[in-house]
Amino acid sequence: MTGLTQHQIIDLLRQNLEAGCGDVLAEAPVHYYQQGAASPPKAAPAQAMQEAPQAEIFPAPQAEVSPAPRAAVPIAKPAPPMAGATELKDAIAMAQKLAAEADTVEALHQAIQDFELCGLKPTAKHCVFQDGIASAKVMLIGEAPGKEEDMEGRPFVGPAGQMLDKMLAAIGLRRDENIYITNIVPWRPPGNRSPSADEIAICQPFVARHIELIQPEILLLAGNIASKTLLGTQVGITKLRGQWQRYQPDAANLEALPMLHPAYVVRRPETKADVWADLCALKAKWGHA
């Protein structure tokens, strides 16, 4: 693992766990078809291991019989070091340059797809860019894609997204009519972990440009990461939710409403009332936007 960063090592371990490689039986590989090989610690109860001869536990195959080939288990490779950039600031500078050059939403999408300096990209199946109507007054920004989103290439399509759709529809917001949806990070972090501070910083120029191009009137910020990143605060979402804020990068000055992330609500159903109160506040504002 020489040359890998801490984040890449953690990602590799998470991917191995996802592939089912979670048991370590010995410190070194053991050839169990080789006569005389040491037996694994978990192969049998300790007493049985002491009583049974090793050859009976792992008998050597007959010379004329070859063991059936085992299906290869695909092990995801770790994300490579950032190509062409040795420091975080270089990757951020490149993201800023590409984002500034994108003069349409389509051009921004292409710039993100071509961007190679975020370690999340090689481990993701799709660049999850957006969903909804580009002319919408309300722009919802979440955290990062999950497994279902990565497979489909659209944000908020898993169980949390299904709940979000129902709650938005209750106040008259629908993807195919009047809301635009995206995330802070467009690639799925392995194992559905939260994106790191470096990954967020690298992707933030694209998010800022995305907001500039869509020109919404209201931002709906779902969860801790979206709220802290765009509002420049360290206040947690449970204290921040439901309180109107201002997103003020450069000349922009947009009203923003932080709310609990739908995935959190799925895990904690008792918070549905809080989210409903926040959406009602959005409806009151959105109806006059």
Image: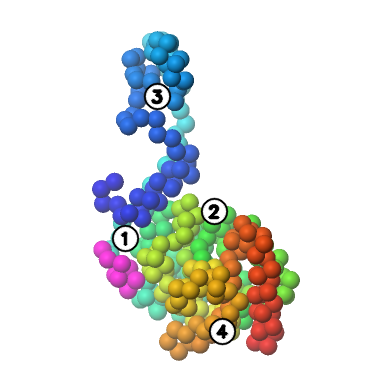
The Cα atoms of the two marked residues, 2 and 1, are separated by: 24 Å
- At horizontal 62% and vertical 71% (from top left) the residue drawn is 132
- At horizontal 48% and vertical 39% (from top left) the residue drawn is 20
Decide: few, some or many residues near mark 2? Use Cα within 10 Å; few <14, some 14-19, many ≥20: some
Of the numbered discs 1 and 4, the one sitting upstream in the chain is 1
**Type of amino acid under label 2:** Lys
The Cα atoms of the two marked residues, 2 and 3, are separated by: 34 Å
The Cα atoms of the two marked residues, 1 and 4, are separated by: 35 Å
Which one is closest to the eye, mark 2 or mark 3? 3
Which one is closest to the eye, mark 4 or mark 2? 4
Image position of 82 (left or right of 259): left
Looking at the rendering, the stretch of residues picked out in magenta corresponds to 86-93
Q: Circle 1 sits in a helix, a strand or a loop, which is it?
A: loop
Decide: few, some or many residues near mark 3? Use Cα within 10 Å; few <14, some 14-19, many ≥20: some
Which one is closest to the eye, mark 4 or mark 3? 3
89 in magenta:
yes
- At horizontal 26% and vertical 63% (from top left) the residue drawn is 86
Q: Circle 3 sits in a helix, a strand or a loop, which is it?
A: loop
Residue situated in front as seen by the camera: 269 or 107:
269
- The residue that label 3 is drawn on is 40
Residue 168, visible in the rendered structure: no
- The residue that label 4 is drawn on is 255
Of the numbered discs 2 and 3, the one sitting upstream in the chain is 3
Residue 278 in which image quadrant: bottom right
Of the numbered discs 3 and 1, the one sitting upstream in the chain is 3
Disc 2 to disc 1: CB gap under 8 Å: no
Residue situated in front as seen by the camera: 288 or 83:
288
Residue situated in front as seen by the camera: 135 or 90:
90
- The residue that label 1 is drawn on is 82
- The residue that label 2 is drawn on is 147
Residue 175 in which image quadrant: bottom right
Which one is closest to the eye, mark 3 or mark 1? 3
